[in-house]
Image: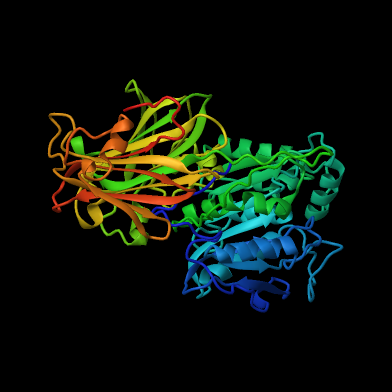
């Protein structure tokens, strides 16, 4: 499920693209990457990212039942282009083919183990290529998925074994003849590749990735579809072998439909790119989704009424501030309501990736807790890949850019919730706490956010952002509190000031001392601050991105509370 709209750390929307990549990533002419054992020249086509390398390398391995296929096939080439756009140098590779296929100059049969040997050569060549950074992964489809799994499990780590692989509709156990509509084709394919009868179980297993696995297999992302032409038992069998070895660094996914191999690449590419990037240890190239279009009614013979404007809602809420210890932990509160069923949200704690956008004092290892209004911990996470929700987070298109960052996917009933961000081992620095709606069209809705943290000057100011979606204006109340914070709280901010900025970077409102400008209007909301030194802005805004900055008027440090209330969507106002 993709979110209705993705919000970036500094509230600036970008066109659909992979961050930091632009320009012409057209493929180069084919190059010979190696010579096979029979002297066959093996070629690849290179797709080079924009910018300056070196980059992680990814082989793109075509299918074709081991007897055919083309590295310049549109699906293969499209995958390679996407990899280059995401910041990987991609190589679409040749390998020898089994009868009746062959490559120019091929004199060997191309049967097992020739093709596996060729892919090992490609891994070594990519690892030693000066354009790469020494890391090598693979995306393979069908027979290419089989090759990916084989070369992830065999060879020498750091030389001709993959570092990470994505296998689309691969065959993993050539001896598994479980009933399937495509079983006859499968048997013909694997017995031709291995050149044995189907009764020779030992020979078929010796050529099968599932049977050569060991506990040091490279991380694999294994995918097929429910109606795939590759028998479904293949993925099930591979998972069984991995689990039997205690391997935990793999992920698997079975899609709806009946597409095969690279035909469903567009559906899974965001998750595949995230999987590759995470295991390469580089920033995850997450595309910025566009808004989901509002469906329109089918034409009818009768007069069509005027369209109703789409109701607005806060699609996400995010706040950046200093996460410290004790009273100064970063606390992000939000309310879902006023009624309805459950709401699926993603809550994230971001730290290390803030350094990539110029934050020098970013929290290096944020930990996240989600607490309900009774004080019960609903969920907790430290390092998003380790919490048992990695696949759900990938599917949300909201993968953190660093494996040390935290994320939680939760279906929550209407009510008040608090996200608490702290640093591992009591580390203190700047972090970002975020809440995203995954099903914005359904009630309940995000009504407000109230974030408390330690506020300083410079990088240490508190920055809260939100996106308004829909067609109608939305009335929001922004509050910056300090002096009125509960007694016993150490060092409250003495004189908070608010500044409101739109998506173009223009300051559209500012306030110091709430009663100086909108006293009567704010008083009517029932949410007027209780101290004259505190700040508030009441404003009606169209759909778009907005950022609120909170700091002290005199540059003092202290603990502050920055709140955004969605008054339009609150049929019965819920107060914190």
At 42% from the left and 60% from the top, the residue drawn is 504
Q: Nearer the viewer, residue 253 or 218?
A: 253
Residue at screen point 83% across, 45% down: 187
Give residue 439's position: percent from left, percent from top.
55, 37
Residue 224 in view: yes
Which image quarter holds the N terminus?
Answer: top right
- Image position of 228 with respect to 118: above or below: above
Residue shown at the point (85%, 62%) measured from the top left: 99
Identify the residue shown where x is 24% and y is 51%.
Answer: 461
Q: Is residue 174 left or right of residue 386?
A: right
Relative to 402, 358 lies left or right: left
Residue occupying the far front of the picture: 520
> How far across and how far down the image is residue 301, in percent?
84, 39
Residue 199 locus on image (x, y percent): 82, 41
Quarter of the image containing the C terminus?
Answer: top left
Is residue 426 visible from the viewing direction of this image? no
Tell whether 510 sits left or right of 253: left
- Image height of 78 relative to 435, above or below: below
Quarter location, residue 38: bottom right
Residues 55 and 34: in front is 55
- 36 to 10, vertically: above or below: below
- Closer-to-camera residue (311/206): 311
The image quarter in which residue 42 lies: bottom right
* Residue 63 on image: x %, y %: 74, 57
């Amino acid at each position: 499920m993709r979110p209705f709209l993705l919000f970036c750390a500094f509230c600036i929307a970008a066109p659909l693209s992979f961050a930091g990549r632009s320009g012409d990533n057209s493929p180069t002419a084919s190059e010979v990457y190696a010579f096979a054992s029979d002297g066959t020249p093996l070629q690849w086509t290179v797709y080079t990212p924009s910018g300056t390398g070196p980059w992680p390398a990814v082989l793109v391995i075509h299918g074709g039942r081991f007897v055919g296929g083309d590295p310049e096939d549109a699906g293969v080439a499209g995958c390679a282009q996407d990899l280059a756009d995401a910041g990987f140098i991609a190589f679409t590779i040749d390998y020898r083919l089994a009868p009746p296929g062959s490559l120019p100059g091929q004199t060997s049969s191309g049967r097992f183990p020739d093709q596996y040997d060729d892919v090992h050569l490609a891994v070594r060549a990519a690892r030693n290529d000066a354009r790469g950074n020494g890391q090598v992964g693979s995306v393979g489809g069908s027979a290419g998925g089989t090759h990916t799994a084989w070369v992830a499990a065999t060879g020498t780590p750091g030389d001709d074994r993959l570092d990470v692989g994505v296998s689309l509709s691969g065959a993993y156990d050539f001896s598994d003849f479980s009933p399937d509509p495509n079983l006859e084709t499968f048997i013909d394919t694997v017995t031709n590749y291995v050149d044995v009868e189907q009764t020779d179980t030992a020979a078929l297993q010796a050529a099968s990735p599932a049977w050569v696995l060991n506990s040091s297999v490279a991380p694999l992302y294994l995918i097929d579809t429910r109606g795939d032409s590759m028998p479904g038992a293949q993925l099930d069998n591979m998972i069984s072998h991995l689990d039997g070895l205690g391997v935990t660094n793999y992920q698997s996914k079975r899609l709806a439909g009946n597409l095969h191999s690279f035909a469903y690449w567009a559906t899974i590419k965001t998750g595949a790119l995230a999987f590759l990037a995470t295991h390469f240890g580089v920033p995850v190239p997450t595309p910025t989704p566009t808004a989901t279009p509002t469906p329109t009614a089918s034409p009818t013979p009768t007069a069509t009424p005027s369209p109703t404007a789409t109701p607005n809602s806060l699609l996400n809420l995010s706040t950046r501030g200093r996460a410290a210890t004790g009273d100064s932990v970063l606390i992000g509160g939000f309310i879902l309501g006023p009624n309805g069923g459950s709401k699926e949200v993603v809550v994230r704690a971001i730290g290390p990736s803030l350094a990539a956008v110029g934050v020098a004092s970013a929290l290096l290892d944020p930990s996240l807790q989600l607490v309900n209004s009774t004080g019960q911990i609903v969920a907790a996470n430290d390092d998003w890949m380790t919490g048992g929700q990695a696949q759900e987070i990938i599917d949300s298109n909201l993968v953190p850019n660093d494996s040390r960052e935290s994320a939680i996917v939760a279906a929550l009933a209407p009510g008040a919730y608090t996200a608490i961000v702290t640093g591992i081992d009591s580390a203190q620095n700047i972090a970002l706490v975020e809440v995203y709606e995954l099903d914005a069209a359904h009630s309940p809705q995000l009504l407000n956010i109230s974030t408390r943290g330690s506020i300083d000057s410079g990088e240490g100011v508190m920055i809260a952002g939100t996106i308004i979606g829909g067609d109608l204006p939305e009335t929001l109340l922004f509050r910056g509190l300090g002096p009125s914070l509960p007694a016993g709280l150490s060092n409250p901010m003495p004189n908070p000031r608010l500044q409101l900025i739109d998506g173009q970077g223009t300051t559209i409102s500012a306030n110091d001392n709430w009663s100086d400008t909108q006293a009567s209007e704010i008083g009517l909301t029932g949410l007027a601050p209780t101290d004259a030194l505190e700040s508030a802005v009441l404003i009606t805004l169209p759909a778009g991105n907005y950022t609120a900055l909170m700091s002290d008027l005199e540059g003092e440090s202290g603990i502050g509370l920055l709140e955004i209330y969605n008054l339009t969507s609150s049929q019965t106002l819920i107060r914190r």
